[in-house]
Every structure is written in structure tokens, then in C-alpha cells.
Amino acid sequence: MMTVRKAYNGRRRPGARGSETASEPGEGQPEIITDEPTIQGNLPAGRFDAVDDQSNDSHLYTRNFDAFPAMIELLENRGCRLLFGGIRKLPVLKDYSKRLLAVGNPRCLSYRVLNYASRNYALLEVDKPDINKGLSILLLEQPRPDFTWHATVAELEQRLIKKSLRWPTTYLDETFSGAYRRISHHGVRARETMVSKVAYQDVKAICYWS
């Protein structure tokens, strides 16, 4: 899985291996790493009927998300602070095929958790170039301080596949008590010249809701 890290000081951890540099967090800053289940607390034990195939090639799929990084950058410019996030390949579920694109490549989910006005939010987008009706970006507000985003994202991935790439409304209502919003993406795949415009429209909707 591709990770997003913020606020580190560049010191390499002893024993760190691979192409990514593992670093210590800056003074007074949380360490930002996608593999961490939550800002604080531990990932509770759970039972999943999926194979979480998060190998180190997720960075190859960044081009599938045209406007999403630009949208996050605009949010940071408007006072949001990026906490963690990354790109995840949707899990393998028996008898379900939506984890793959029409061309046979893994379908991915990109998500970011941000802090704004002392509240935490998550934005999720699914790779969808082969879907005629684009799947909306999902904006979620963290419901409680000890909430575990990692487990929730993993659960959402499974339910998303089982519902044929539709956000699971019942689960969202139960988990977030209505504190979520679907944001219509302006185009399934934004052309490069349209990325800034697309991101700006999405940011306006997010800031208005938040």
C-alpha cells in the first residue's frame, strides 16, 4: 500500500528497509502512516472474509486518481491538516469480481484523513474508469475520539464490493449517525487541464458541509 506521511524530520529508523524511508515524527507531531489503524488507540480484533492484498505496488495506480490529490492540496491550503492516508487495492472476496477493473487490473481506493476545526474527516474515492455512472466521493466525519479508521475502511471496502460498487447506506447510517456526505465527482476521469477546476468544485462542497 502506498502511504502518506506528514510532519517527519527525516531521521531513518534503525532496521528500516525498502524504498520508502521510515522516519520519526517531528516534535509534538503524530507519526503519519497509513498502516496505523487510528490516530490513537489500537486496531480491535475483527473477522473479515477477505484477503487484504496490500503489496508494495500501490503507487503504480496513483494515475487512476486525477483530481483527488489536487482536491486534498486545496483543502490543506484552506486550513485542513493531512493526518494520514494512502491507496489500497480492494480485497479479494469469493464470488465477487468488482475488485478488478474491466481490463483486469486491481481496483483501488484512495483515502485521506484530515483535521479541520478540531474535527477529523475522511475522504474516500474509488478507482472507477469503467463505471458509466461515476461513484461519488465519500466524506465522513469521525464519530468519536477512539474511532479506528483502518478497520472502518477495510469494512467499507468489503461492503462496497458486495454492493457492486455502491456505498453501503445502512452501514454508514449506523456507523456515522448521518455525519457523512456523498460528493458528486465532476467527471469519471478528469482530464489534466480540468483537474484544478474539478478539485475546486469538490472543495467548495466539502468546506460548505464541514
Image (tube, grey):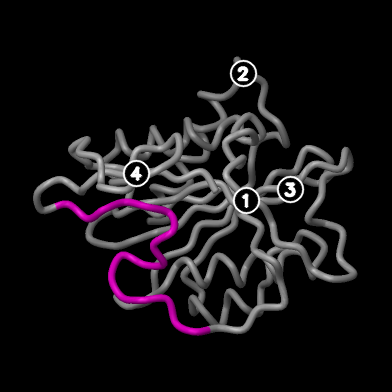
Name the residue carrying label 1: 109
| Towards the viewer: 28 or 164 | 28
Tell me, for residue 5, which label it has, or none: 4
Segment colored magenta: 29-45
Q: Amino acid at mark 2?
A: Glu
Q: Are marks 3 and 4 in contact (CB under 8 Å)?
A: no
Marks 2 and 1 sit apart, C-alpha to C-alpha, by 20 Å
As for residue 37 lying within the magenta part, the answer is yes
Q: Secondary structure at mark 3?
A: loop
Residue depicted at 62% across the width and 84% down the height: 47
Mark 4 burial class by Cα count in 10 Å: few <14, some 14-19, many 20+: some
Tell me, for residue 107, which label it has, or none: 3
Mark 2 burial class by Cα count in 10 Å: few <14, some 14-19, many 20+: few
Residue depicted at 71% across the width and 50% down the height: 135
Tag in front: 2 or 4: 4
Marks 3 and 2 sit apart, C-alpha to C-alpha, by 21 Å
Q: Secondary structure at mark 2?
A: helix
